[in-house]
Image (spheres, rainbow, N blue to C red):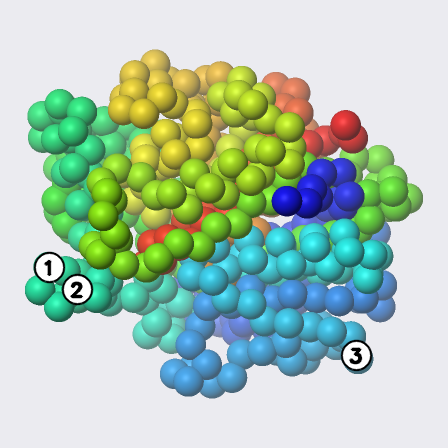
Amino acid sequence: MGNIKDKVAIIGMGCIKFGEHWNKGMGDMIIEAAYEAYEDAGIGPNDIQAAWLGNAERPARFGYVGGGYVADALKLRNIPITRVENACSTGHEALRNACFGVASGMYDLALAIGVEKLKDTGYGGLGTGRGDHPVLEFRRTAPASFAFIGTRYFHTYGLSPDEGKRLLAQIAVKNHHNGNLHPKAHLRREITIEQVLNAPIIAWPLGLFDCCGNSDGAAAAIICRADMAKKFRDDPIYVKGIGFSVDTLHPGFRPGFDWLGFEANRSAARQAYEQAGISNPRQEIDVAAVHDCFTITELMVYEDLGFSPKGRAKEDVEAGSFTLEGDLPVNSDGGLKSFGHPIGASGLRMTYEIYKQLQGKAELPVRQLKNPQRGLSHTLGGPPQVSCVAVFGNSLG
């Protein structure tokens, strides 16, 4: 397998405030995110040589959404622009393609942009049903899918229903605390353990505060050759590794699938870690933004990505390991729980947080971590399994 380590860098990023943007179309959000990225990089639209758009909307239902949508919004002329889609990893897919386009030597500067408009389209983001087994899982929902993981996790590792629910509640409280500190988060609200435990149940054990919301959002990144990066800024962020994995969408038909994690997560992490030269992610990653569509998802990802030993994430959660004050802060911006999940934008929004943290430029001093050197962003899509893991650093080598 090849290696992208230190071949490309991010020199600019933009991210709009996620929320209910009834007065903005996708083009408006694309412009806002892209021009923040342009200003951050010190470039203009005429410097972009290629672009990739991450957008998961269904063209047949909402009208055609392709590369021309970005060309129209940003007045880009006669350059290659490609729309990509890969479930919840769509934003990362745009980033990955832009990175590989530059790393190949074809382009010096490329734009990755992700956008999704959910609130006034009637499109539910994660959809209304999952599962294709005609008897066992017909039309189950996304919360129900991850509820399977929750109940299996509790059973396998000996957690009572109350213990399991309280464990997940700690993740929800952590992420809402972090999101309350972020000016671009949608759901800025502190919550308590008791509020999580007493909230309406969506799919047991997942209650209202265990599930991410729907939002409108957009985020963008400017990618350039690593050897050019310091011509644009003193503090570029270098791509150390990108792993991407797609596995069968029918876990019910796959012998040995245990509902305790996803091989796509583990495979994408192995790829990214190998490229980045990481052997102990818990010790070598300083901050991570992971896919917390549900609190049980974040718990599972701790173990899939090697942050916690299998079945032992509970100990790390209770020790505060993944809080802003812990040894590996996870979702320091509040994650999907606080931003919502406009699918095409989420992977780039996560990367925006890592980019800012590694530069020491988080919006508020209380959010800025102490001297992080390496960060990770991750998405998990589906029906399972589609996963991307990207590792970044603030120096070469």
Nearest to N terminus: mark 3 or mark 1? 3
Residue kind at label 1, given as amino acid type: Leu
Which quadrant of the figure has residue 91?
Answer: bottom right
Callout 2 touching callout 1 (CB < 8 Å): yes
How many numbered dots are placed on residues in this image?
A: 3
Taking the spot 21% from the left edge, 66% from the top edge, the residue there is 132
Q: Is residue 127 above or below residue 259?
A: below
Q: Tag on residue 133? A: 2
Give the foreground label among 3 and 1: 1
Name the image quarter holding the N terminus: top right
Query: How far from the left and from the top, in percent, is residue 74?
Result: 71, 72
Q: Nearer the viewer, residue 232 or 273?
A: 273
Name the image quarter holding the C terminus: top right
Taking the spot 48% from the left edge, 25% from the top edge, the residue there is 329
Q: Nearer the viewer, residue 121 or 21?
A: 121
Residue, disc 3: 77
Which quadrant of the figure has residue 230?
Answer: top right
Q: Tag on residue 295? A: none
Left or right: where does residue 253 sit relative to residue 214? Answer: left
Q: CA distance from mark 3 to mark 1?
A: 50 Å
Residue kind at label 2, given as amino acid type: His
Q: SS for tag 3? A: loop
Which quadrant of the figure has residue 196?
Answer: top left
Q: Is residue 86 above or below residue 336?
A: below
Residue, disc 1: 136
Query: How far from the left and from the top, in percent, is residue 82?
Result: 64, 72
Query: How far from the left and from the top, in percent, is residue 385?
Result: 37, 53
